[in-house]
Image (cartoon, rainbow, N blue to C red):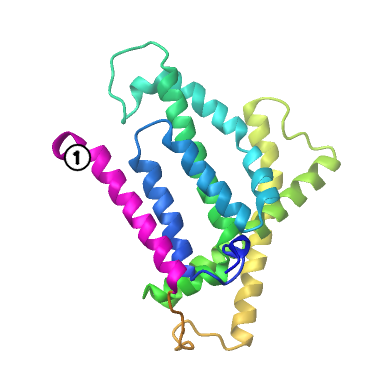
C-alpha cells in the first residue's frame, strides 16, 4: 500500500477516518500538558499532507490567525472568570493563554482536516456502517458537501458588493452590521434556492430516504485495524495518565 495515498484514496475504510478524527478530538480535551498540542497539530498536518490538501489547509488556517490572537489576549487576561480556571488572581497569566490558544488551534486544525480529508460520500457510508439511520447520515453528508459551496457564494457576493462601493469594514459597529445585511440577505436567498433545487432533483429521481439502499460491502483490512488499535491505545494511555496517575502510578 502506498503511504502517500492512504488518506487520499479508498485505501482506508471510511470508519477508520472517522475514528481517527474522533480520537484526535478526544486527545485535544484529554491532554493537559502544553507540549502535547504540537504533536497533535503535527499529526493533523501529516494526515492533510497524505490527503494531498496541504495548500487549501494552510490557506484556510491562516484566516483564523486574528481569532487566535484575540483568544490569547482574552485567556491571558480574563482566565480567572472562566469556568475552567477558578481563581481570585487578577494578574496576567501567559501560560494559560498559550495553553488555551494552542488547544483552540488544534481544534481548528482537526476540524479543517476533517472537512478536507473526509469526503461527504465517505461520511455517509461511515455513518451507515455505524448503523445510524440513513436519513441522518444523508442529511449530515449533504450539509458537509455544501459548506464549501456556501463559502464560495459568500465570497462572491461580498466581492460584488465591495466592487459596487459598499464599505463593510468602515464606520461604527452598528453601521458595519447594517452593511453586512446586504451580503447575508442574498446569501440566505441563494441558500434557499439551492435547497429548493436539491429537493426538486430528489423528487424527479424518486429519491426516498426510507427506501432500502444497496448493501454496503466494506471490510476493515490490516491497516485499518492497526490504525484503530493505535488510536484506542493512545486515548487509553492519555486518560489513565492524566486522570489516574496519582492513584495507579
| Helix, strand or loop: magenta stretch | helix
Q: Secondary structure at mark 1?
A: helix
Q: Picture coordinates of residue 132 (x, y %)?
A: 38, 73
Farthest-out residue, front: 1
Q: Is residue 25 magenta?
A: no
Query: Does the image show residue 214?
Result: yes
| Residue at image location 49% in from the left, 41% down from the top | 106
Locate the N terminus by quadrant.
bottom right
Q: Picture coordinates of residue 11 (x, y %)?
A: 55, 71
Locate the C terminus by quadrant.
top left
Q: For the residue carrying disc 1, how many other residues have a C-alpha within 10 Å: few (<14), some (14-19), or many (20+)?
A: few
| Residue at image location 39% in from the left, 10% down from the top | 91
Q: Is residue 225 magenta?
A: yes
Indicate left or right for 241 with 220 as reference. left
Q: From the viewer's perspective, is residue 92 above or below residue 186?
A: above
Give the residue number, with chain letter if any, for mark 1: 244
Question: What range of the chain is rendered magenta?
Answer: 221-249
Q: From the viewer's perspective, is residue 75 above or below residue 121?
A: above
Residue 7: which quarter of the image?
bottom right
Q: Picture coordinates of residue 79 (x, y %)?
A: 38, 22
Q: Picture coordinates of residue 248 (x, y %)?
A: 15, 40
Indicate left or right for 227 with 32 as reference. right
Query: Does the image show residue 136?
Result: no
* Residue placed most toward the observer, 122 or 178: 122
| Residue at image location 58% in from the left, 62% down from the top | 3
Residue 90: which quarter of the image?
top left
Farthest-out residue, right: 164
Q: From the viewer's perspective, is residue 124 above or below residue 186?
A: below
Q: How many marks?
A: 1
* Residue placed most toward the observer, 177 or 23: 23
* Residue placed most toward the observer, 213 or 139: 213
| Residue at image location 36% in from the left, 42% down from the top | 29
Amino acid at each position: 500500500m502506498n503511504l502517500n495515498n492512504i488518506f487520499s484514496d479508498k485505501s482506508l475504510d471510511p470508519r477508520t477516518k472517522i475514528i481517527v478524527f474522533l480520537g484526535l478530538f478526544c486527545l485535544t480535551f484529554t491532554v493537559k500538558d502544553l507540549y502535547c498540542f504540537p504533536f497533535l497539530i503535527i499529526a493533523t498536518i501529516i494526515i492533510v499532507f497524505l490527503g494531498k490538501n496541504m495548500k487549501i489547509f494552510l490557506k484556510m488556517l491562516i484566516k483564523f490567525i486574528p481569532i487566535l490572537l484575540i483568544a490569547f489576549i482574552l485567556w491571558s487576561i480574563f482566565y480567572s472568570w472562566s469556568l475552567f480556571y477558578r481563581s481570585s488572581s487578577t494578574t496576567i497569566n501567559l501560560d494559560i493563554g498559550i495553553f488555551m490558544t494552542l488547544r483552540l488551534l488544534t481544534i481548528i486544525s482537526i476540524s479543517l482536516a476533517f472537512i478536507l480529508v473526509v469526503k461527504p460520500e465517505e461520511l455517509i457510508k461511515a455513518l451507515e456502517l455505524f448503523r445510524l439511520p440513513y436519513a441522518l447520515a444523508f442529511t449530515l453528508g449533504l450539509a458537509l458537501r455544501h459548506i464549501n459551496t456556501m463559502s464560495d457564494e459568500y465570497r462572491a457576493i461580498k466581492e460584488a458588493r465591495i466592487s459596487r462601493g459598499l464599505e463593510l469594514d468602515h464606520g461604527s459597529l452598528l453601521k458595519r452590521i447594517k452593511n453586512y445585511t446586504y451580503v447575508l440577505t442574498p446569501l440566505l436567498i441563494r441558500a434557499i434556492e439551492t435547497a429548493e433545487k436539491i429537493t426538486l432533483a430528489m423528487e424527479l429521481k424518486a429519491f426516498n430516504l426510507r427506501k432500502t439502499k444497496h448493501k454496503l460491502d466494506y471490510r476493515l483490512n490490516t491497516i485499518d485495524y492497526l490504525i484503530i488499535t493505535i488510536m484506542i491505545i493512545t486515548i487509553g494511555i492519555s486518560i489513565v495518565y492524566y486522570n489516574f496517575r496519582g492513584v495507579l502510578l
